[in-house]
Amino acid sequence: MRLAFFLAALPFVSLLGFAQSLTSSNGVDITKIGGVAISTGNGVSGSGVQRVTIASDSTGQVALAAGSATIGALTANQSVNVSQINGVTPLMGAGNTGTGSPRVTIASDQVAIPILGSLGDNSAANTTNRAATLPAIAESNMPSAATAGRNVALRTDLQGTLLASLLPSGFATFAAAKTGLVPASSATDIAVLSGNATNTVIVTEITMGCTQTTAGLFDVQLLMRTTADSGGTSTNSPTARPLDTNNSSAVSAVLTYTANPTVNDGTTRIIDTQKIFIPATTSAANDLFFWRPTMGQAIVLRGTAQQAAINFNGVTLTGGNCDIRYTWIETTGL
């Protein structure tokens, strides 16, 4: 009977001992949960790793371990809106480059990319893109004048032949002609075209024809003066006329002398010289002095001190007179 009581009391005693251990300072070592051994320490996930939820008011930080890590993955063909690259908003659409323009590299086997401009003829200012779709425009007539500083296309005729001239036809061109000039005896400079302080003068042509009552042969010289003549008599000098009535008035002028001027240039700069023989007649000009630029530069006059002078080299024209004409361009572009 004592044995039976003892055995019956064992569960109660054991339960009292377990309850006592929970209320004491002794810890509880849990080796299984749900019948599965608990995974501890660092390692991979498994059936013994507990599922947890981070509280919404948690102040702790969750960080990835050092090294590469993948957080989720996009499904195929899923779109992504990239609002920044390297912390900078990308530049979109047409416009200028900037910090938001990604740097790109063209592949070495890239097929040549044609550069096509969208400029209209005589449209864009000279600080903008100069690319053009085609190098020239076919014209049936001469084109209208463009605006200075604009992009313009070359012109061809309808067969594709480039339209060109010795000098630009759109430059302001002038002429001054004198009829019946009677030079002084022992004539020096009988006519000069002077430069000016406003623009550059390009001499394009000089002609002269003379008559006299006594046959004679003499040299006519064309000289470049760098110090202007002074004095002399030039009261009936010709007026410069524009070859296009839309041109402004000429700045430079031609002087023709009936009394010799003072030649102040101590250096003789002969540009051209020609011998003229004039028979004994006053009916018509018997010989002609003619100058026009060949290959290379024309006579260029810069400033008021420079002149293109026709000089008789001290010869007296007996009983005759001369017709003289100068043609020149005035421009600020050269």
Image (spheres, rainbow, N blue to C red):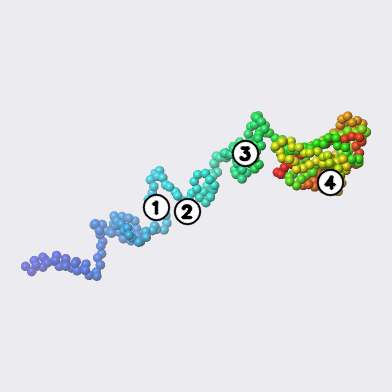
User: In the structure shown, which secondary structural element does the residue marked by tag 4 occupy?
Assistant: loop
Query: What residue is at 25 percent from the left and 58 percent from the top?
Result: 33
Per the rendering, the mark at residue 87 is: 2
Please determine whether, in this image, residue 7 is positioned above or below residue 118: below
Query: Does 169 appear above or below 3?
Result: above
Q: Earlier in the sequence, mark 2 or mark 1?
A: 1
Classify mark 1: helix, strand or loop: loop
**Label 2: element kind:** loop
Disc 1/disc 4 C-alpha distance (Å): 93 Å
Q: Nearer the viewer, mark 1 or mark 4?
A: 4
| Residue type, label 2 | Gly
The tag earlier along the polypeptide, 4 or 3, is: 3
Q: Residue at x 9, y 67 (%)?
A: 5
Label 1 neighbourhood size at 10 Å, few (<14), some (14-19), many (20+)? few
The extreme right residue here reads 214
Which one is in front in this view, the residue at disc 3 or the one at disc 2? 3
Task: Residue under label 3, please give it.
Answer: 122
Q: CA distance from mark 2 to mark 4?
A: 74 Å
Give the residue pinned by disc 4: 229
